[in-house]
Image: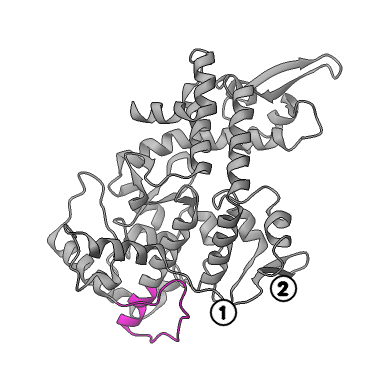
Amino acid sequence: MRTHVINSILKHPHYKAITTRLKTTSAQYVASRARDPTFEKLMDKYKNLLKVIAIQDLILANPNKNPPSISLEFLSKLSQRYHLNRGATSFLRKYPHIFRIYYDPIKSQPFCKLTDAAVEVSRQEAEAINASLPLVVDRLVRLLSMSISKSLPLRAVFKVWRELGLPDDFEDSVIRDNPHVFTLVDGNEPNTHVLKLVNENESEFTAAVENWRVMESCREDCEVDRTEIRYCFKHGFPPGMRLRKDYKAKVKEWQRLPYVGPYNEMEETKTTKAGIKALEKRAVAISHEFLSLTVEKMVEVEKISHFRKWFGIDMNIRDVFLDHAGIFYLSTKGNRHTVFLREAYERGCLIDRNPVYNARRKLLDLVLLGRHAMLTDISKSEIKTGNAGSQRENTQ
C-alpha cells in the first residue's frame, strides 16, 4: 500500500509545537495504533459487501435485458479491478442468495443475474431513497454550504453519491429538478462542471455537534463541564486503549479551544500556534459534519479527500482522523482506508437508523448467509418486512 509522507502542513514553522507524530507516515501509524475490534469486525463484513454491491451495480446497469444480467466472460475481465482473487465465478458461487448463474442457449454462454431476494432488497433501497428526496436536497445544500465558495466539482459529488443517499439519476432528479436551489457551471478544465448554490447566503444551518451540545448540557448526568461545552466534541475510545494523564490533559485543553464552525465564514487565520490549532479544530468540525451527512456515518478517506481544498482544509485529512481517535475511527480493512464517526455507532450498528441504511443492512445480511441453507419462505418474508437484519444483529 502506498504510504503518505508528511505533507505541506508539517512544513509550517509552528507545526512542530502542536503535534506529537512527526517521524511516521499515516499508513505506518494506522498499522501500529490500537485497533477497535468492534469496527474491525464490521469492516470484515463490509469488505465483501462492497464487492457484491459493485457487481450488483453492473447487473442493474443493464435494465433493457430481461432479467438484468451480465455475462461471466465480461465479469471475469474485471476480476482484478474488483479484487475477486479466486475469479468471478468462484466469488458469485459464494453468495447464492444474491447471485444466480444460468446458461443462455441463444448466446451460448453463462450469465449472472440477481436472485429475487436481492432484487427485493434493491427495490426497497430505491424506494427509501426516493421517499427521502427532501432530505437528500438538504444534505447536498449543507455539503455545498461548507465549501468556502459554496460550490463543489460535480465529479467529487459523484464520488460520494451512495454515501449521501443520492438517487442513481441525481443529476436530473435532484439538481436539474431544483433549479431554484442548484446550478451547474463549466469548470476550469474541459468537460468538467461545478455545482453551485443559487442563493449562497439564504440558508443557515446548525451543525450536528451543536445539537449534541444542547442535548448534553440538558442531561442531569452530563459528563462534560457545562461551562466548557461550547467548543466540545463527543469523545469515546477503543476498549483497552490506555490513555495517559498527559494525553487526557491535552484532549481537555483541545476541547476548550475556540474555532470557526463548518457553516461559518472563515476569516484570515493568524500564523500562530493558536491559529493553526483553530484551523485543525475547524477541519475536525467539517469532517464530523461531513460524516454526519452520510447515510451510514462512514466514508472512504480517499473520497472525502477530494473535498479538502474546497473546504479550506490545509492538512492531510487522514492525519485529522488519526490524531482524533476519540471522535473518528480509521480502518484499513479490505485494502482501503475507511473512517467512521465513532459516536454514531454502538456494538457495530448505527444508533439512529434510517430506511436507506436498513435496506443496505438487509443486503449485508444476505452476504453473511454465504453458502448457508437457501432462503426459506420465512426468511424471504423477513427480508420484505425488515426483520432478518435486526434478528441477525441481535445474535451478534
What's the residue at 41%, 73% (across, down)? 261
Q: Tag 2's secondary structure?
A: loop
What's the residue at 39%, 57% (across, down)? 26
Quadrant of the image occupied by residue 212:
bottom left
Q: Is residue 25 above or below residue 365?
A: below
Q: Is residue 321 left or right of residue 50?
A: left
Relative depth, front residue between 211 and 255 = 211
Residue 192 is one of the magenta-drawn residues = no
Relative depth, front residue between 46 and 260 = 260
Give the number of the disc on residue 201.
1
Q: Tag 1's secondary structure?
A: loop
Mark 2 vs mark 1: in front:
1
Quadrant of the image occupied by residue 303:
bottom right
Q: Identify which amino acid the numbered label 2 is placed on.
A: Asn
Q: Is residue 275 above or below residue 187?
A: below
Q: Identify which amino acid the numbered label 1 is placed on.
A: Asn
Q: Residue 156 appears at what percent x and percent y?
A: 61, 60
Magenta range: 258-280
Extreme right residue here?
106
Asked if residue 340 shows in the view, the reply is yes
Residue 262 is one of the magenta-drawn residues = yes
Residue under numbered circle 2: 188
What's the residue at 63%, 41% (across, down)? 126
Distance from the alpha carbon under mark 2 to that under mark 1:
24 Å
